[in-house]
Image (spheres, rainbow, N blue to C red):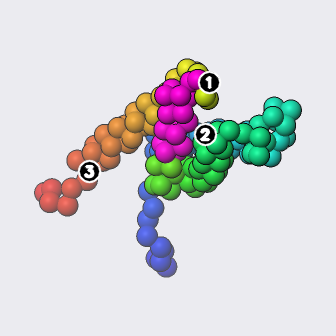
Amino acid sequence: MLHDSAHVPKPSLTEVLFGWFLRVVSASCFWFALNYWAMLIGFSHNGAGRFDLLPPEWRAAATALAVVYPVAAIGLWLLVSWGPVVWVLAAAIEIAVHEFYPGTFGARPLLFVLHGAVAVTFVLFRVALFVQRLRQARKVRVDSP
């Protein structure tokens, strides 16, 4: 008896490592989200970061990041295409507030380096996957004799 389902190719090592990479980034996004939520509800910073005690610019930034980071974490964990897009949005917001307004939000150069390293690693994985798919497409051609 023949199988009714279509043959699904086994994922390559690059694809498996890329999935693990996205899940590690997802866990870090969830950690960032928990930190922002802990600050906003007064659980961390001895209650000094509670939403009602924050200046308006911190309210806007912290609230946006507390919402965007968990969404990015879910998208990255599920390996869907919008996960990295939402992560880029969250990273851009966080980098912008700390790099352009260091007097208000404080300077965090390590944050810029970490987000940059994740972005470069993501791009390198995508290039490797693209090259791998090009090689596979050259191996199997319908019009070869």
- Front one among 48 and 25: 48
Left or right relative to 55: residue 89: left
Give the image quarter of residue 134.
top left
Which residues, given as a range, are shown in magenta?
87-103
Q: Residues within 10 Å of mark 2 (few under 14, many from 20)?
A: few
Report the disc number at residue 57.
Answer: 2
Check if residue 91 falls in the magenta segment: yes
Where does residue 120 sit, x and y in percent of width and height? Answer: 43, 30
Disc 1 residue type? Gly
Label annotation for residue 96: none
**Distance in Å between CA atoms under marks 2 and 3:** 51 Å
- Front position among marks 1 and 3: 1
Could you say which disc has been placed on residue 106 in the image? 1
Q: What's the distance in space between the residues labelled 1 and 3, CA to CA? A: 49 Å
Which one is in front in this view, the residue at disc 2 or the one at disc 3?
Answer: 2
Say if residue 32 shows up in the picture. Answer: no
| Residue ID for mark 3 | 137
**Badge 1 element:** loop
In the picture, residue 104 is in which quadrant? top right
Looking at the picture, how far across and down is residue 9, in whole percent? 44, 56
140 or 57: nearer the viewer: 57
Q: Amino acid at mark 3?
A: Ala
Residue placed most toward the observer, 35 or 55 = 55
Tell me which residue sits at (23%, 47%) in the image.
138
The kind of residue on which mark 2 rests is Glu
Q: Residue at x 55, y 20 (%)?
A: 109
Separation of residues labelled 1 and 2 (CA atoms) = 12 Å
- Answer above or below: position of 114 versus 133: above
**Tag 1 near tag 2, CB within 8 Å:** no
Disc nearer the start of the sequence (1/3): 1
- Residue 59 appears left or right of 138: right
Quarter of the image with the C terminus in it: bottom left
